Image (cartoon, helix red, strand yellow):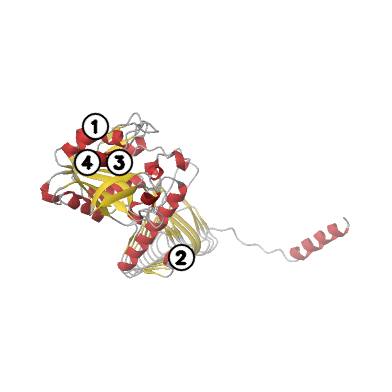
């Protein structure tokens, strides 16, 4: 958190009571996800860097939103009577400094832009600051009508004249003012409009009527775009992914085909990581320096240590740690498993609920049977173990250091260190039986 200008305490009121009706979703709008994180979580992260206090306004029966907002306080807007009414529900938290009202469906505002908003509010003679943008397609956004750098009014598109619609400066809805004055303006907002709602944008008219200077702070459309539909959610996702890709490359990550790589908001990649095309990072991924993530791999809730190689076509699931210089190859799935330094599982393998030691090799087609239908069980494989191809390890089981598992084995008991385990039936060859079998089948086909 940065200190507010002039050391005044600053409070952010986050409006998150929207139902997501236009998204045709049973999930509240604030819980719709961008880069693997709910929209409200993005806004909280940015606001917490700038404001001294946060309070979130939610609707009734939104326990999941309240849980996400914790530890910040929440207040409930029991009746959805408009954005000014929603902001007033948090009046008890305004304090005596500055107050800004933000929107959960406007989640990509950066901490830098919020800092500029507070700074503008403290410029000489500015009593109200707002955020505005110049979108490529202004469409039905409300227009900000300004003269000599000061905002005169905000005109909704439906009420605008052709000349006003030609204005490309558009309202983003975010306002910031002194708490005492803001409180008075909010109480004076009327609901004499077609919807009978109390609109936050009417605060601008109140300020102008009081002779207060209103200043617009401009920011990029990608930060200020509102999200009310699935289409707008997809557009915001694309914009955010571009931002995350650019940040990764600026930090020293090589993206071979950036437009094909998808990040979560919390993805952490160290310098000199190489990411090949068509890789998806789910929540909670850390990749250390020198690691390579090869094409068509999916990672979630895992750590990949330095110089490891993942993929192509690998899946790392939550709880997985891949050790330094270890290798996970094509069509290998790893879940809740530690793969030791220099260990290898190069192809066609499932590793679940296991600890695998340094420089061990798990052969093609190996499966760890970790689930008995009721409980998960642990498998422990020591250092420098060789597991032959097409082996099945039935957990719980432990394989000692330097042990060797013969290919095709089914291992149900612990294997001591330095031992060789054979877990397969003895082969028996029946002379001429193959030939006689084929002749019998042929005769049956000929006889119908």
Q: Which mark is residue 333?
A: none
CA separation in Å, label 3 and label 2: 52 Å
Q: Point out the frontmost of discs 4 and 1.
A: 4
Q: Nearer the viewer, mark 4 or mark 3?
A: 4
How far apart are the two marked residues, 4 and 2, measured between alpha carbons? 59 Å
Q: Residue furthest right?
A: 447
For residue 170, say whether it is visible: yes
Q: Are marks 1 and 3 in contact (CB under 8 Å)?
A: no
Badge 1 marks a residue whose secondary structure is helix
Marks 4 and 3, how far apart in space? Answer: 11 Å
Closer-to-camera residue (200/344)? 200
Q: Going 48% across and 47% down the picture, which residue do you hit?
A: 371
Residue position marked by numbered label 4 in the rendering:
207
Marked residue nearer the N-terminal end (4 or 3): 3
Residue marked by disc 1: 187
How packed is label 4: few (under 14 Cα within 10 Å), some, or many (20 or more)?
many
Residue tagged 2: 311
């Amino acid at each position: 958190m940065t200190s507010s200008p002039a050391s005044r305490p600053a409070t952010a009121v986050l409006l998150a009571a929207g139902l997501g009706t236009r998204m045709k979703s049973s999930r509240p709008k604030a819980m719709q996800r961008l880069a693997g994180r709910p929209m409200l979580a993005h806004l909280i992260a940015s606001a917490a860097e700038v404001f001294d206090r946060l309070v979130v306004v939610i609707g009734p029966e939104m326990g999941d939103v309240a849980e996400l907002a914790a530890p910040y306080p929440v207040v409930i807007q029991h009746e959805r009577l408009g954005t000014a009414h929603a902001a007033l529900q948090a009046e008890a938290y305004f304090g005596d400094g500055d107050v800004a009202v933000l929107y959960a469906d406007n989640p990509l505002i950066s901490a830098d832009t919020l800092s500029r908003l507070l700074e503008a509010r403290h410029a000489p003679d500015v009593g109200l600051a707002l955020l505005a943008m110049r979108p490529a397609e202004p469409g039905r956004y409300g227009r900000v009508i300004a003269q000599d750098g000061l905002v005169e009014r905000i005109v909704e598109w439906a009420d605008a004249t052709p000349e006003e619609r030609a204005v490309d400066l558009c309202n983003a809805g975010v306002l910031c003012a002194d708490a005492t004055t803001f409180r008075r303006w909010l109480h004076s907002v009327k609901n004499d409009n077609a919807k009978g709602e109390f609109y936050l944008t009417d605060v601008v008219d109140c300020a102008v009527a009081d002779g207060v200077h209103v200043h617009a702070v401009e920011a990029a459309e990608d930060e200020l775009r509102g999200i009310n539909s699935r289409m707008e959610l997809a557009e915001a996702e694309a914009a955010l992914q571009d931002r995350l890709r650019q940040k990764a490359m600026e930090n020293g990550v090589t993206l071979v085909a950036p437009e094909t790589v998808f990040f979560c908001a919390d993805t952490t990649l160290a310098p000199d990581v190489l990411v090949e095309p068509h890789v998806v990072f789910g929540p909670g991924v850390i990749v250390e320096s020198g690691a390579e993530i090869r094409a068509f791999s999916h990672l979630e809730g895992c750590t990949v240590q330095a110089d490891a190689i993942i993929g192509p076509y690998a899946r790392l699931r939550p709880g997985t740690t891949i050790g330094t210089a270890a290798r996970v190859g094509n069509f290998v799935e790893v879940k809740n498993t530690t793969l030791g330094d220099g260990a290898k599982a190069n192809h066609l393998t499932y590793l679940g609920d296991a600890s695998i030691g340094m420089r061990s090799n798990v052969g093609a087609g190996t499966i760890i049977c970790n689930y008995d239908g009721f409980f998960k069980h642990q498998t422990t494989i020591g250092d420098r173990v060789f597991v032959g191809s097409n082996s099945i390890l039935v957990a719980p089981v432990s394989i000692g250091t330097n042990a060797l598992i013969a290919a095709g084995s089914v291992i149900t008991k612990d294997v001591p260190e330095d031992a060789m385990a054979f877990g397969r039936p003895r082969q028996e060859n029946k002379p001429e039986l193959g030939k006689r079998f084929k002749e019998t089948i042929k005769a049956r086909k000929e006889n119908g």
